[in-house]
Amino acid sequence: MSAEIEEGADKGERTVRKKIEPLMIELLSEVELESGLKEWSFIPIIMSDKFIAGFPEFVKLRRKDKSLDCRVHIEYERFKSAHEQEQVMMALDAMERSIKMMGKQKITENDQVILKDILSTVRKKLLITN
């Protein structure tokens, strides 16, 4: 996970990334996807209305290295003022949206289900246990 973030949301994004990323890496290492996808790069875009137009949402498949870059918006003002649990929820919701966008890049429905299941496991670990 990396990010396109505006000042003011950077600390929250780092905290959220440190919670989500290790769990995602662990769970993704246990699966093999039909599409042969080796890497899923989720890049949240947390920018105010002033800058957001320059940062469109997209999903890009890099066939050569079998990686997928997913750039998805998270509402800046809401994220900036949210408590940590809500920030985690917002990031996980954005990741779920990125999975829905993967169909445009010919990521199979079965692979999308697997990724959603992994995301659901992460959500349960981070939001229900705390």
Image (cartoon, grey):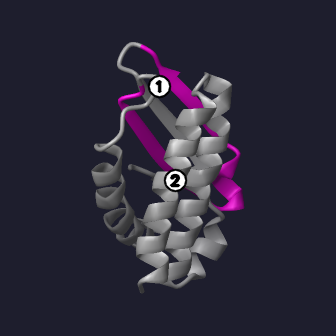
Identify which amino acid the numbered label 1 is placed on: Glu
Residue 81 location, quadrant: bottom right
Q: Secondary structure at mark 1?
A: loop
Q: Vertically, is 73 above or below 48? A: above
In this view of the protein, which residue sits in the foreground, 64 or 124? 124
Q: Is residue 94 visible?
A: yes
Residue 75 location, quadrant: bottom right
Per the image, the residue denoted by label 1 is: 34
Residue drawn at x 58%, y 72% is 79
**Magenta part of the chain:** 37-63
Does the segment drawn in magenta span residue 50? Answer: yes
Identify which amino acid the numbered label 2 is placed on: Asp
Mark number for residue 21?
Answer: none
Per the image, the residue denoted by label 2 is: 117
Q: Secondary structure at mark 2?
A: helix
Residue drawn at x 70%, y 45% is 53
Q: Position of residue 29 (x, y in %)?
A: 28, 43
Residue 33 location, quadrant: top left
